[in-house]
Amino acid sequence: MEFAEFALVCERLEALAARLEMRDLIASLLPGLDEAELTIFVRFIQGRVFPDWSPEKLGIGPNLLYEAVAYVAGRKRADVVRLVNETGDAGLAVERLLAKRQQSAFFSDSLSLAEVHALLVRTASASGAQSQQAKMRLLRQGFGAMTPREARYFARLVLAELRIGIGEGTVRDAIALAFELEPALIEHAQQARNDLGEVALLARIGPEALREVSIVPFRPVRLMLAQQGTIAQQLADFGPVAVEYKYDGSRIQFHRVGQIGRCWSRRLEEVTHALPEVVEALLAATSGDVILDAEVVAVGPDGRPLPFQTVLRRFRRKHGVAEAREAIALVPRVFDCLYADGETLLDRPLAERRARLEAQLGDHLAPQQVLDDEEAVRAVYEQALADGNEGVMLKLPASPYTPGARGRAWVKIKPEVETLDLAVVGAGWGEGRRAGAFGTYELAVQDRGQLLGVGRVATGMTDEDLAALHALFKDLVIAESGNTVTLEPQAVFEVGYSEIQKSPNYASGYALRFPRFVRVREDKGVDEVETLETLEARYRRQATQNGGNGTSTVE
Ligand code: AMP
């Protein structure tokens, strides 16, 4: 497949509104692709170059991209930025600029899908002192050989946002349709492999290949997620629950093969080298090959858990790990087992996985009790809080492990705290003492793939925070206008507030009263922020709590 054809497909998909039509179009193309193309196409169409678990990252921010485009179009970087501002989309801006490029290019050496992929792989592998220049050369080379339409989608692919409305579900269903298989079978394989590109290859082989698929050690699977709930409701609807403490730390997935142990964070970044004592502890506590799900907590000298930020600081550390290890002791609390001695356990009920876990693990097991009495569960909850934990998790003993899914199989019970996790989509330059750094940040909730504004936060940050945040965000600027900037939505803030109010000023229709920055949720992605639906539910709950008087409108 030529990259030009891929771009044309994207353009057609972008014009479609119905999910089924999108699915049909993608499905019609899959059987005609060769092996390598099939994998690449399936990843690209989702706006990905590499699977989530891959250590390969492009490492190209908007600024580098704009510079490459400016060069190829024979314009200034400022022209590119201006057009991105006008169009609100880097892809469209790039397309328009290249359409006007003074020196007409020869497209005789047009690129195939595989060649664009190879170019991006080379871009990702450029490292060391000269890496930015190397990436720039490769980008110029790519744009130089592309038509404006190709450049639109190439630019978006590089920024990891294709904007054609294709979610993982649509691609999964397209693969099922193309190879005449049940979508559930595709989903099953995807849970273990975490890469639809590879799953598409298995689908082409046939249903057996999908059914037999197993987890590949050292390739992390997505983590199962929890939903909020109440003790009474969970017991009433499902009967006995497995109760565990909800530790206030950071999630890891640990893989062991032979004498080698490695671990990944919640966002599937490898953290083996940042957490040597955790790896050592889990190697010592296990004997066979396993994959474990655990929370890592920091403990103080008195054995009580230390705050969550202490743990995160360790996750991020690249240098001075040995010193940090002495200052903060990290310990794992293991609560699930996804794989043991060559067997994938995702489909097994929790009760069976727990039995396997207890057989595999000599130490660091998170205690669990199966209870069906509300008072008894509440007593564990009170004890969990008294011991310095966040609350408890209630899990259904019969439930399978569903990677990446949030459902009632795992429910978290914790005290009501009024904070929201929100996407950071823009910023404003500070004034006075805060000049030279961003002083306010614009926040958004998600609603079916879109981010909708819900207000700004400017308090709760120390000067140190502001400097650190500025360093984090300065490379994510996509567009500038006056003293505000649009940011590539990548980071998540936890924000406190006193009340949710209706507001015509923001796209979500809501605003926060007294928003206050609490922390950066480095363990969360933008796809995990508060949804409009849950925000509305909070708004309604708050109205009932305040007897219907507490909901005001901000003008
Ligand atoms: P939340 O981040 O509030 O959605 O809560 C879910 C998180 O709680 C998980 O991702 C884990 O990091 C953490 N957690 C703490 N203890 C447990 C446990 N016993 N089982 C599952 N998750 C836990």
Image (cartoon, helix red, strand yellow):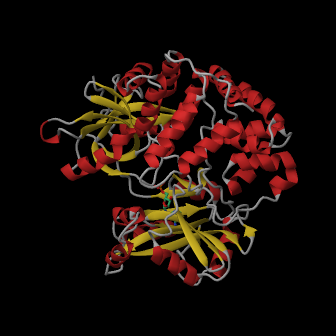
Left or right of residue 482, residue 43 in this image? right
Q: Nearer the viewer, residue 77 or 505?
A: 77
Q: Residue drawn 57% across and 34% down?
A: 142
Q: Nearer the viewer, residue 41 or 543?
A: 41
223 lies above or below 261: above
| Image coords of residue 207 (percent x, y) | 86, 50
Q: Residue drawn 75% across and 69% down?
A: 343
Q: Quadrant of residue 249?
A: bottom left
Q: Residue drawn 44% across and 68% down?
A: 274
388 lies above or below 60: below
Left or right of residue 133, residue 458 in this image? left
| Image coords of residue 506 (percent x, y) | 36, 26
Question: Can you see residue 547?
Answer: yes
102 lies above or below 440: above
Total numbered labels placed on residues in the image: 0
- Of the 4 image quadrants, the one containing the N terminus is top right
- Of the 4 image quadrants, the one containing the C terminus is top left
Q: Quadrant of residue 54?
A: bottom right
Left or right of residue 459, residue 184 in this image? right
Q: Nearer the viewer, residue 389 or 457?
A: 457
Q: Residue drawn 52% across and 18% down?
A: 103
Question: Can you see residue 163?
Answer: no
Residue that extends furthest to the left in the rendered view of this protein: 432
Q: Nearer the viewer, residue 455 or 144?
A: 144
532 lies above or below 521: above
| Image coords of residue 193 (percent x, y) | 69, 55
| Image coords of residue 223 (percent x, y) | 58, 57
